[in-house]
Image: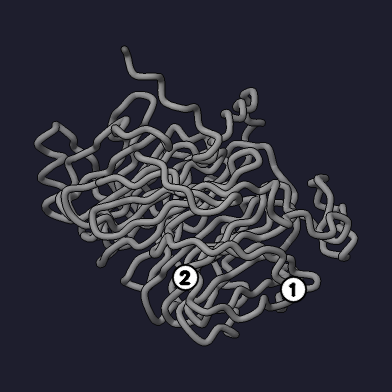
Amino acid sequence: MSAAGTTKSCWKLGEFVAHSSSVNCVSLSPSNGRMLASGGDDRKVVLWMVGQASPLLKISGSTSPVQSVTFNSSENWLCAGTKSGVVKVFDLDENRLVRTISGHSAAIQCVDFHRYGDILATGSMDTHLKVWDVRRKGCIFTYRGHQDAINCIQFSPDGKWVVSSSNDNTVKLWDLGAGRLLHDFTEHTSAVTSLAFHPMELLLATGSLDRTVKFWDVERLCQVSEAPVEASGIRCVQFHPEGQCLFSGSQDFLKVYSWEPARTLHSCPVGWGKVADIAVSGEQLIGASFYQTNISLWCFDLKSMSSQPRPDAHGSSQTTSQSLSSSGRRQFEYRKEEFQRPFTQASSARPQQQDKAELKEKESKGGNSPPMTEVKPEERAKILESRQRLMRTPPKKTPPPFLPPEAAAPPPPLPL
């Protein structure tokens, strides 16, 4: 990965060939953006360390192109959604396939892990959002309502809701426990391509091909504000981990926004093209984009950006359900709990038809899993029933920052 400078606040970390055919998806590790997963038409999932030229791990075995990838919050599991509608979950610590799950009738465009356990959500071109119990391979619920392909999904920080965005221009907020639609946000005028929950406040940000970023109060179920219209469609949005601001990536710019009032705090031109993901790493922001078989990585110096907008107006670091930010908005209740998952039992519902190629592949490895079934309504409550507090691990150390090209160490002198 060769370095290529751009500006003092933004520079290109490098570009490399990631797959033997077109790259379809890229995901950065959520804690610090220093690990990257990619999937492509070559039917492989590849794991990279940002800043290193060679891959950490190549995972093959899928029978169709990989359309979506994501890490869990602990970053020891990786999920991949395929064009055939099959989900594969990998254990990165043990370097093995944990689960192969099928149930969608079209390509899986997006995947997300639940914060507190082995629960997974998938969004598909078949317009359905499914929530799975990964440990027992059961489908907890299927949410129906979108009229076009689902582009993005995310669980709320407290684990009570899941939100989905679609090519039908809508954003839907679903109740995870009750399995029902809470609200339909319909103010976007084009496909909604990205969304992000505020880490503390009951606030949601959505980005769309209509070139706008909108902010929503998910308690009052109303729009809070709308950022200035951009020159091109929004491809990804991400809140700062401390909730100070929102980062937005479009075709040629990284923007930093506040929302009360909605204004652009910083604008950084960057020729990254099809940006796929952004993640905060200490006092830097890592961005990943792809084009054909290549992936490009970018670094932004947050210290040089105006990324500290009115911290008093955007809430504090307290995370109790009764606390209020100075904007008057309630905050998420973080439940440091694990979920209990009983064995998934067969119901009277007709078993989902599994992908024959995937079944054949698994049978060749000696697997004899029973056909998947929809979890009974009375079992959903048990699956989401809290059992005990999570065993908390020490926080990961922040890796050293990337140096801009002009600050990099000079090459050693040539021998005489």
Residue at 57 percent of width and 44 percent of height: 115
Residue 169 appears in the figure: yes
Q: Depth check: 167 or 183 in front?
A: 167
Whichever of callouts 1 and 2 sits on the residue coming sooner in the sequence is 2
- Assign the C terminus to one quadrant of the image: top left
Q: Looking at the image, is 317 positioned above or below residue 337?
A: below
Residue on which disc 1 sits:
262
Which residue occupies the extreme front position in the image?
416
Secondary structure state at the residue bearing disc 2: strand
Q: Quadrant of the N terminus?
A: top left
Q: What separation in Å lies between label 1 and label 2 (alpha carbons)? A: 20 Å
Residue 45 screen position, x and y as percent: 27, 43
Q: Mark 1 belongs to which amino acid?
A: Ala
Label 1 close to label 2 by CB (< 8 Å) = no
**Residue depicted at 66% across the width and 62% down the height:** 256
Helix or strand or loop: what does disc 1 sit on? Answer: strand
Taking 385 as reference, is 295 left or right? left
Residue 324 is tagged as none
Q: Amino acid at mark 2?
A: Thr
| Residue 178 in view of the camera | no
Lateral position of residue 358 relative to residue 121, left or right:
left
* Residue 65 in the image, given as x and y percentages of width and height: 20, 55
1 or 2: mark nearer the eye: 1
Q: Which mark is residue 193?
A: 2
